Image (cartoon, rainbow, N blue to C red):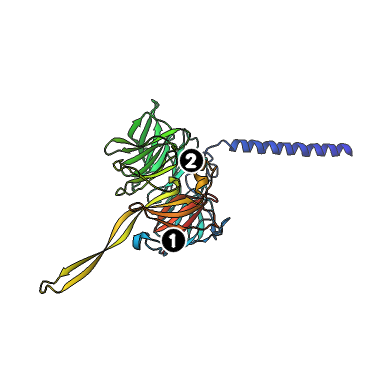
Amino acid sequence: MKRYIYITIGIIIAAAIAILILFLIKDHSAGPSLGISGGTNTGFLPTAGTQGTNNSGMAGGGNTSTTLSLSPSATTGSAGTGAGGQMTVQNFGVLSNDPVLDYFIDQKNNITAIEPDGEVITISNGQSTTISSSTIENIISAGFSYDGKKILVSYGNPTNPQSGVFTLATNAWIALPQGMMSPRWSPINNYQIAYLVMTNSGKLALATIDATNPKATSATLLVINADDLTLQWPTRSEFILSDKPTSESAGSIWAFSSQAGTLTPLLYETSGVESIWSHNAAFPYGLLFSSSGQNSLELQSLSGSIGPQPLNLSTLPSKCAFNTELVPVTTASSATAPTSTKNTVSKTASTSTPYLALYCGIPRSSSGFSSAHLPDDYNTMALFTSDDIYKINTATGAEQVLWSDATQNMDVSDVKFFNNALFFVNRYDQRLYGLTFN
C-alpha cells in the first residue's frame, strides 16, 4: 500500500516540476521580446486593433478630485478673456480611469488616448471604449498627429528602435523603417514625420518621411557629427536638436531652419538642458531650462534674435505648455460732427490682441525641488512634486494661480490645451485630469 502511495506522490511531484519548468520557459521567452502583441502577432505590428468593451464611470483614485465629464456640447468659456486675461476655474477633475501615456481631444470633446501598454481607448461622455487592445512592449515615446487621427509610437531598443503608426479610422498599424530615433509629427496637417538616424559613416542625419506612404524615399535635411540627440518640431521649417537632459554633463540646444539651412545655438555646453516650444509661428518662443550654477528658466526666441528673458519660476519645461490667446482691448476715440464744433461724439472700439500664455505646474515645495539633481531626478522618477497650476502672460510677465488645493497631490506633466480647457497627466496615478474655465 505504501508503495502505491509513494508512486502517486512521485507522479504528483514530477507533474508539478514539469508545470513549473513550462511556466519559467514561457515567462523567460516573453521577457526579452519587443514589439506589439495582439493574438499571435507577438513582436510584430498587427494589421488591425481589436474592438473592446465599454467601461462606464471614471473613478477618482487616490486623490479626492471629482470626475470631470466633457460633453460634446460643453462650452468652457474663452481662455484669456477678461481684463489682463484673468480666468477662473469652473470645474476640475479626472477624465480617465486608466493610465494615459498620451492623448488628444477633438472639437466635440471626445478623448482618444494611448495607454502605457500601447492599448488605444476613446472616452466620450464618461464612457471608455477600447479601440485597439494590441499591446506594445518597451514604449519609448508616443504622440498624436496634428489632427489626432494617427498615433506615432517608438518602442524597443533605444539605440535601434522600431516605430509604427496607428490610424484611428481603420484601426490598423503600419510599420515604419527601423532605426528612427526621436520621431516627431509635423506641426502642420501633412502627416510628415521627422526623425534622427545614424548614417553608415557614423554621423547623425535629420530626415523626414511620409507616414501615409512609409515605403517612399525619406528626405535628408541635415547631417552632423553628433550622436544621442533628441528632436522637436515646433513649426513648419524649424527643428530643435538637443542633447539628452542631464546634470552630469554639458549639453546644447540648437535650432535648425530647413528653409534657411542654418543651425543656430540657443544654449551651448550647459548642463541639464531641457526645453519646450510654441507651435505658433507668429510667437516662436521656447521655455529653456539649465542646471548650470543654479537652476534657471528662461524664455527665448526660436531664431535666437531676441535675448533670453529669465523667469522667476521654479519648475521644469516638461511641466508646462504654451497657448496663444486673446486679450480684449477697448480704445476710446472722439469725433466731431461736421455741422457744429460743440457736438463731440465719443466712441469706443473693442479689439483683441493676441499674446502667448504659458501654463505650468509649479511645485509647492520649491526648496526640495531646487536642491534635487535636475532634471535627472525628475525624469527618472526619483523625484515627484505636488503642484499648483499657474498661468503666465509672456508679454507682461503677469502670473495667475489657476488651481491650488493642498489636499491633493498633482504632479503635472504632458500639459495640453484643447477647446479652451487645460489638460494634464498626473504622474502619481498616470491618469488624465482637466480644468475648465469660466
Q: Quadrant of residue 350?
A: bottom left
Nearest the viewer among 5 and 358 is 358
Residue ranking furthest to the right: 1
- Which secondary structure, mark 2? loop
Which of marks 2 and 1 precedes in the sequence?
2
Q: Residue at x 34, y 60 (%)?
A: 84
Nearest the viewer among 146 and 218 is 146
Quarter of the figure that contains the C terminus: bottom left
Residue contact between numbered discs 1 and 2, judged by CB atoms under 8 Å? no
Q: Position of residue 255 (x, y in %)?
A: 34, 38
Amino acid carrying label 1: it is: Thr
Amino acid carrying label 2: it is: Leu
Q: Is residue 308 visible?
A: yes
Q: Residue at x 31, y 49 (%)?
A: 283
Q: Give the Cα distance between marks 1 and 2.
A: 31 Å
Q: Position of residue 10 (x, y in %)?
A: 80, 36
Q: Nearer the viewer, mark 1 or mark 2?
A: 2
Which residue has dot 2 on it?
374
Q: Is residue 151 visible?
A: no
Nearest the viewer among 112 and 263 is 263
Residue ranking furthest to the top: 201
Q: Is residue 411 above or below residue 29?
A: below
Which residue has dot 1 on it?
436
Q: Is residue 159 above or below residue 414?
A: above
Q: Is residue 123 above or below residue 19?
A: below
- Which secondary structure, mark 1? strand
Q: Is residue 16 left or right of residue 3?
A: left
Q: Position of residue 279 (x, y in %)?
A: 35, 48
